[in-house]
Image (tube, rainbow, N blue to C red):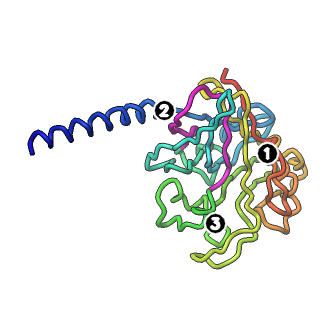
Amino acid sequence: MAAGHQTLLAVKKTVLLPLLFLLLSCTKESSDISISFFVAWHGQPLRCDAPADGVSLTDARLYVSRLVVHGTGGDEWPVTLEPDGAWQNESVGLVDLESGAGDCLNGSSAVNASIRGRYAGGEISSVSFDIGVPESMNHNDPMTAGAPLNYTEMHWHWASGYKFLRAGVATDADSVFLHLGSSRCEGTIGDIQGCRSANRPRVMLADFDPDRDRVVIDLGVLFDSIDLSNGARSSCMSGPAEAQCTSMFDALGLAFESGDRIAQPRAISAAREQ
């Protein structure tokens, strides 16, 4: 029996060890990645306490999900975000570019200018991501959800769910803001059946090097059609009756009437760090 048992063990090792080696050799090592963001006004850096061309920032916060890096050979590698208990879970990250200073009256001093994670792949040629919270999480209760879905100021507290993007600017006499999120939602809070207008822009940035490039949220492009000198404050809450939303949605690559993606967002680009 002892000899037979030893023979069986030897056979198992003969079969299992090569199989284990093959599995290990096929497993790609994961690499760290960090994507940095900043907010601008027609290309000039914009801050709450540092106006650009007489325009100051009032808000700049956005959720990022479905982050994918693309290789030079056409490969695609999903990025798993690193949960940190504040800004990220494994699927969604919150970028917060307002500091609570100056005209950012609805913000806080806490900021987060990057999304961090890991991917199993090689050399990166481009990146892509959604602005928004996935539908499976979009109607969570922010009072009980974990980070980063626990920020109540990023939620409408009704059927529409989370605000995917909060952005705004002001001059001495005028202002404009956008709160982007899903609309035309059906159901009641806690029992949402879905939203007819998803309103989730998809961003693709070619020739993007995470070590040298940053994602630019250009509010000058987003609000390009808004007259900030007429003293009439403007806003868009993603609702169907707001005519001012049309141009903002267009700058984000969305059709306002349907919420469908129709183009690469003009208001989102990449810039090399100086």
Residue at point 64% right, 72% down? 158
Q: Residues within 10 Å of mark 2 (few under 14, many from 20)?
A: few
State the residue position of label 2.
28
**Rendered view: 174 above or below 216:** below
Q: Earlier in the sequence, mark 1 or mark 3?
A: 3
Disc nearest the viewer among 3 and 2:
2
Q: Which mark is residue 161?
A: 3
Relative image position of residue 81 (x, y in whole percent): 51, 44
Q: Is residue 101 visible?
A: no
Q: Are marks 1 and 3 in contact (CB under 8 Å)?
A: no
> At label 3, which amino acid type do we have?
Gly
Q: Callout 3: 10 Å neighbours few (<14), some, many (20+)? A: many
> Looking at the rendered structure, which numbered label has been put on residue 42?
none
Which mark is first along the chain, 2 or 3?
A: 2
Mark 3 residue element: loop
In the rendered image, is residue 89 in sight?
yes
Quadrant (top left/top right/bottom left/bottom right) for the C terminus: top right
